[in-house]
Image (spheres, helix red, strand yellow):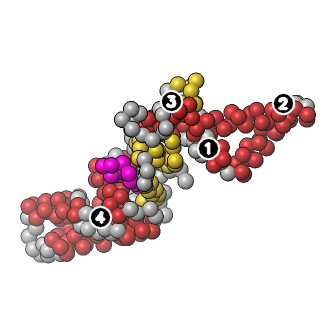
Amino acid sequence: MAEISAKLVKELRDKTGAGMADCKKALEQSGGDIEKAIEHLRKQGAAIAAKRADREAKEGAIVIAKTPDDKLAVMVEVNCETDFVARNESFLKFANAVANAALERKISTLEALSQIQLGADFDHLPVSQAIETMTGKLGEKIVVSRISLLEASEGVISSYIHPGSRLGTMVHLTGVNGNNGNIGKEIAMQVAASAPLALTRADLPKETIEKEAEILREQAKNEGKPPQVIERIVNGRLEKFYQEVVLLDQPYFKDSDKSIAELLKEAGSVEVKRFVRFQLGER
């Protein structure tokens, strides 16, 4: 068996990020050949990934990558098994590499994402194989579970990542300028804080409204309200529901006396076109 020097082990560790013991074992099994040792570690990662396929991966991070002109943004959710790994520098580096690769190629689906190559830090491997390598390195199931891409032919994309990387939002706005430039972040934070279901009332699915109305109708009946006033009560309480779930109707999180629609009006000709919200583990 070839003698494996500490320098060679360190070189393999620097290339792969694998543990020292794993690097030494891989070099021993490959006769000191770095490339063969790298391939051995990849196969080891694939084997670990297969063994952990049935594990739950509910922890992880939400990351966002944007172009400098704020015209294009990608948000991805990358999951692992424990919060300990979710805070690991290597895991976060991988998550950000995935987001940046998706941004560069304007990827919007998980299927397409799995096939694109990452950079030199991940040996130019496609995402699907890089996941196996990361699984071998970190010892946990790794999953890229969601991706969303927003592009602004007009306007800009504003974004917000809540501390801890468990919640992220992207918002497409038009009418943003030097006089109201902070409005984008304010709306992105509003979406994070208040979790709207829709931008406008018209965007709410009819089934959602009907389900809420039926719940309110049953509540009114249980309260002993007379039949002739129940529908009026339901319609009134639906107004409160809209203020809870419709972004433009929601009270501004910094000033509850002001709706988001009113905030936008004060800012000038700002208009929200679309928003996306990812919270870790939600589907």
The residue that label 3 is drawn on is: 266
First-in-chain label (2 vs 4): 4
Residue in view at x 42 percent, y 40 percent: 176
| Furthest residue in direction front, as rendered | 269
First-in-chain label (1 vs 2): 1
Residue in view at x 18 percent, y 60 percent: 13
Picture coordinates of residue 89, whole percent (x, y):
28, 49
Which residues, given as a range, are shown in magenta? 64-78
**Other-residue count near label 3 (Cα within 10 Å), few / some / many at <14 / 14–19 / ≥20:** few
User: Measured along the vertical axis of the image, is residue 4 above or below residue 240?
Assistant: below
The residue that label 1 is drawn on is: 200
Residue 118 is marked as: 4
Query: For the residue marked with disc 1, what is the amino acid?
Result: Thr
Query: For the residue marked with disc 3, what is the amino acid?
Result: Glu
Please tell me whether the stretch drawn in magenta is mainly helix, strand or loop.
strand
First-in-chain label (3 vs 1): 1
Q: Are marks 2 and 4 in contact (CB under 8 Å)?
A: no
The residue that label 2 is drawn on is: 223
**Other-residue count near label 2 (Cα within 10 Å), few / some / many at <14 / 14–19 / ≥20:** few
